[in-house]
Image: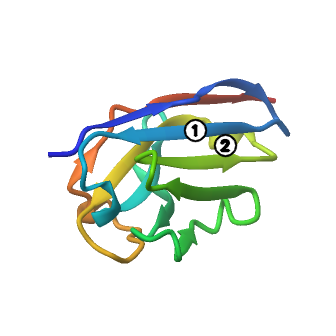
Amino acid sequence: QVQLVESGGGLVQAGGSLRLSCAASGRTFSRYAMGWFRQGQGKEREFVAAISRTGGQTTYADSVKGRFTMSRDNAKNTVYLQMNNLKPEDTAVYLCSAALTSQAMSRASSADYWGQGTQVTVSS
């Protein structure tokens, strides 16, 4: 069982930055590939970024490439999402996921666990 708790969301002006964190419980964190997804109001959940269990592989949605960076610290059981040059269309609830696999996964159906999410609001 893995529990995921996101933090770091908030209100920011367009062009600003935020860093999200996702802290995982348990001693098997390094066995999980991790992902970030987001869900805007009235919209479907969409992939944002993913990282392999070692951190050696990352993948990003085209909409965030060059602006967002995902990383992980297996010693701290935590993954991060650094978000720069935020846009109003980035406004959403951001959710952390864990998948018991080695590769970075971009499909929500691959996730074994989800966090509750953290709200990110970008004003224009």
Name the disc covering residue 90, or none: none
Q: Are marks 2 and 1 in contact (CB under 8 Å)?
A: no
Residue 10 location (% of width, % of height)? 63, 23
Residue that numbered label 2 is attached to = 89
- 68 on left or right of 103: right
Q: Nearer the viewer, residue 1 or 36?
A: 1
Q: Residue at x 52, y 56 (%)?
A: 72
Q: Residue at x 45, y 45 (%)?
A: 76
Q: Residue at x 53, y 36 (%)?
A: 92
Q: Label 1, secondary structure: give it.
A: strand
Q: Residue furthest right?
A: 15
User: Vertical placement of 17 versus 62: above or below?
Assistant: above
Q: Label 2, secondary structure: give it.
A: helix
Q: Residue at x 82, y 36 (%)?
A: 16
**Quick one: quadrant of the C terminus?**
top right
| The quarter of the displayed image where residue 5 is located | top left
Q: Earlier in the sequence, mark 2 or mark 1?
A: 1
User: Vertical placement of 69 versus 122: above or below?
Assistant: below
User: Vertical placement of 81 versus 16: above or below?
Assistant: below
Label 2 or label 1, whichever lies nearer to me, is 1
Residue that numbered label 1 is attached to = 20
Q: Residue furthest top?
A: 11
Residue 55 location (% of width, % of height)? 50, 69
Q: Nearer the viewer, residue 97 or 76?
A: 76
Q: Residue furthest front?
A: 75
Q: CA distance from mark 2 to mark 1?
A: 17 Å
Q: Nearer the viewer, residue 17 or 45?
A: 17
Task: Name the residue type under label 2.
Answer: Glu
Task: Name the residue type under label 1.
Answer: Leu
- 10 Å crowding of disc 2: few (<14), some (14-19), many (20+): few
- 120 on left or right of 65: left
Q: How many marks?
A: 2
